[in-house]
Image (cartoon, helix red, strand yellow):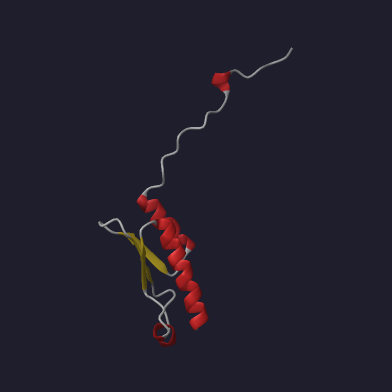
Amino acid sequence: MRTTVREQDEPRLMDVPPPTRDHLISEIQERFPGWGVWHSDAHRWWAFRTAFAPLTIGQLRAGCRLIVQADTHTELCAAIRAEIEYARRAA
Protein backbone atom coordinates (compact mmCIF):
# COMPACT_ATOMS: atom_id res chain seq x y z
CA MET A 1 0.00 0.00 0.00
CA ARG A 2 1.39 3.33 -1.05
CA THR A 3 0.84 6.39 1.11
CA THR A 4 0.84 9.93 -0.09
CA VAL A 5 1.17 13.16 1.79
CA ARG A 6 -1.77 15.41 1.40
CA GLU A 7 -1.15 19.10 0.82
CA GLN A 8 -2.61 20.09 4.18
CA ASP A 9 -0.14 17.77 5.94
CA GLU A 10 2.90 19.46 4.40
CA PRO A 11 4.66 22.08 6.47
CA ARG A 12 4.09 25.56 5.14
CA LEU A 13 6.54 28.39 5.19
CA MET A 14 5.04 31.30 6.99
CA ASP A 15 5.81 34.89 6.31
CA VAL A 16 8.43 35.88 8.82
CA PRO A 17 8.24 39.48 9.99
CA PRO A 18 11.39 41.55 9.60
CA PRO A 19 13.62 41.75 12.67
CA THR A 20 12.70 44.46 15.13
CA ARG A 21 14.96 47.41 15.79
CA ASP A 22 15.81 46.05 19.25
CA HIS A 23 16.71 42.67 17.73
CA LEU A 24 19.01 44.35 15.20
CA ILE A 25 20.67 46.40 17.94
CA SER A 26 21.33 43.26 19.99
CA GLU A 27 22.64 41.42 16.96
CA ILE A 28 25.09 44.21 16.08
CA GLN A 29 26.33 44.49 19.68
CA GLU A 30 26.88 40.72 19.82
CA ARG A 31 28.73 40.78 16.51
CA PHE A 32 30.96 43.70 17.58
CA PRO A 33 31.93 43.46 21.27
CA GLY A 34 33.17 46.81 22.48
CA TRP A 35 30.51 48.75 20.58
CA GLY A 36 27.17 50.06 21.84
CA VAL A 37 24.41 50.75 19.32
CA TRP A 38 21.29 52.90 19.16
CA HIS A 39 18.77 54.03 16.57
CA SER A 40 17.81 57.69 16.82
CA ASP A 41 14.43 59.37 16.42
CA ALA A 42 15.86 60.82 13.20
CA HIS A 43 16.12 57.21 11.92
CA ARG A 44 19.93 57.18 11.95
CA TRP A 45 21.96 54.26 13.25
CA TRP A 46 24.79 55.08 15.67
CA ALA A 47 27.54 53.08 17.35
CA PHE A 48 29.99 54.11 20.04
CA ARG A 49 33.06 52.47 21.48
CA THR A 50 32.64 51.19 25.02
CA ALA A 51 35.24 50.82 27.77
CA PHE A 52 35.58 47.18 26.65
CA ALA A 53 37.73 48.31 23.71
CA PRO A 54 39.05 51.82 24.41
CA LEU A 55 41.27 53.69 21.99
CA THR A 56 44.79 54.72 22.85
CA ILE A 57 45.97 58.31 22.58
CA GLY A 58 47.92 57.30 19.47
CA GLN A 59 44.80 55.85 17.83
CA LEU A 60 42.83 59.01 18.63
CA ARG A 61 45.59 61.18 17.19
CA ALA A 62 45.63 58.98 14.08
CA GLY A 63 41.95 59.82 13.53
CA CYS A 64 40.15 56.79 14.93
CA ARG A 65 36.59 57.66 15.83
CA LEU A 66 34.71 56.98 19.04
CA ILE A 67 31.31 57.23 17.31
CA VAL A 68 30.15 56.20 13.83
CA GLN A 69 26.77 56.71 12.16
CA ALA A 70 24.92 55.40 9.13
CA ASP A 71 21.55 55.37 7.39
CA THR A 72 20.99 51.62 7.75
CA HIS A 73 22.04 48.87 10.12
CA THR A 74 23.98 47.23 7.28
CA GLU A 75 25.92 50.44 6.62
CA LEU A 76 26.55 50.79 10.35
CA CYS A 77 28.11 47.31 10.47
CA ALA A 78 30.38 48.29 7.58
CA ALA A 79 31.37 51.52 9.38
CA ILE A 80 32.18 49.61 12.57
CA ARG A 81 34.27 47.09 10.62
CA ALA A 82 36.17 49.94 8.95
CA GLU A 83 36.85 51.61 12.31
CA ILE A 84 38.04 48.36 13.86
CA GLU A 85 40.46 47.87 10.98
CA TYR A 86 41.63 51.51 11.13
CA ALA A 87 42.26 51.24 14.89
CA ARG A 88 44.16 47.99 14.36
CA ARG A 89 46.43 49.67 11.82
CA ALA A 90 46.93 52.73 14.03
CA ALA A 91 47.88 50.67 17.10
* Quadrant assignment for the N terminus: top right
Where 61 falls versus 75 (above or below)?
below
Residue 77 percent across, percent down from the top left: 45, 62
Which residue is at the far top?
Answer: 1
Where 2 falls versus 72 (above or below)?
above
Residue 73, image quadrant: bottom left
What residue is rendered at 45% in x and 38% in y?
Answer: 16
What residue is rendered at 40% in x and 81% in y?
Answer: 63
Q: Is residue 61 visible?
A: yes
Quick one: 64 or 14, which is closer to the camera?
A: 64
Residue 41 percent across, percent down from the top left: 25, 56
Residue 44, image quadrant: bottom left
For this view, does 46 lie left or right of residue 34? left
Where 64 falls versus 79 (above or below)?
below
What residue is rendered at 41% in x and 47% in y?
Answer: 19
Q: Is residue 29 visible?
A: no
Which residue is at the far right?
Answer: 1
Residue 89 percent across, percent down from the top left: 52, 80
Quick one: 8 or 72, which is closer to the camera?
A: 72
Count of all numbered marks drawn on residues in the image: 0
Residue 13 percent across, percent down from the top left: 51, 32
What residue is rendered at 42% in x and 80% in y?
Answer: 55
